[in-house]
Amino acid sequence: MKNTILTLTFALATLTFCNAQQIEIEKVFGGYKYTQNGKLMKMKDLVKTMESNQKAFDLIKKAQSNNTIASIIGGAGGFLVGWPIGTAIGGGDANWTLAGIGAGLIAIGIPISSGVNKNAKKAVELYNSSLNSTSYYEFKPEFKIIAKGNGIGLSMNF
């Protein structure tokens, strides 16, 4: 009997105090910064954390793939803009057509990056809302002492 009560008490304490931590969102220049327990989270950390919530996971995976595309397009555009500028600074004959193509690539990458930020923010908000609905604040067990003909018992309903 003592072992049963001890086991029940330990299980209740574990369920009450073990809850997942929310991901905090902070607006920064060009997007958002995500932290959990004071630790900065990268996109791969967000993906790994959200595996337990399918809707949030789908959104963050979409954001991750679009982030890769935006990074490639933006990096190529930055290179194509930077090369003629570097050539001009160095005294050479710059090919400004490359700079124009690079500016176009950067212009294409900006809306993709904006979509990444929107999807990642939605995913984090969805993930955090699912934590709130299942956190220990909602766990309210009801205890009753039951006396039967052959003994006394403790009942826990939740």
Image: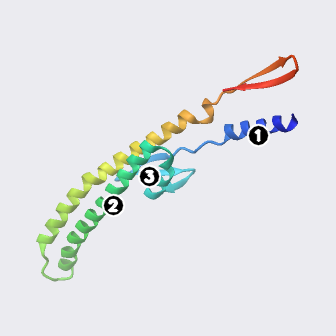
Relative vertical location of residue 110 with respect to residue 135 in this rendering, above or below: below
Mark 2 or mark 1, whichever is nearer to me = 1
Left or right: 158, with 110 as reference point: right
Q: Residues within 10 Å of mark 1 (few under 14, many from 20)?
A: few
133 or 151: nearer the viewer: 151
| Residue under the image location 18 percent in, 75 percent down | 84
Amino acid type indicated by mark 3: Lys
Considering every residue shown, the one lying at the far front of the view is 150
Query: Residue 3 in the image: x percent, y percent?
Result: 85, 39
Report helix, strand or loop for mark 3. Answer: strand
Report helix, strand or loop for mark 2. Answer: helix
Colour treatment of the image: rainbow
Query: Residue 145 in the image: x percent, y percent?
Result: 80, 20
| Residue under the image location 31 percent in, 62 percent down | 71
Asked if marks 2 and 1 touch (Cβ < 8 Å), the reply is no
Mark 1 or mark 3, whichever is nearer to me = 1
Left or right: 65, with 33 as reference point: left
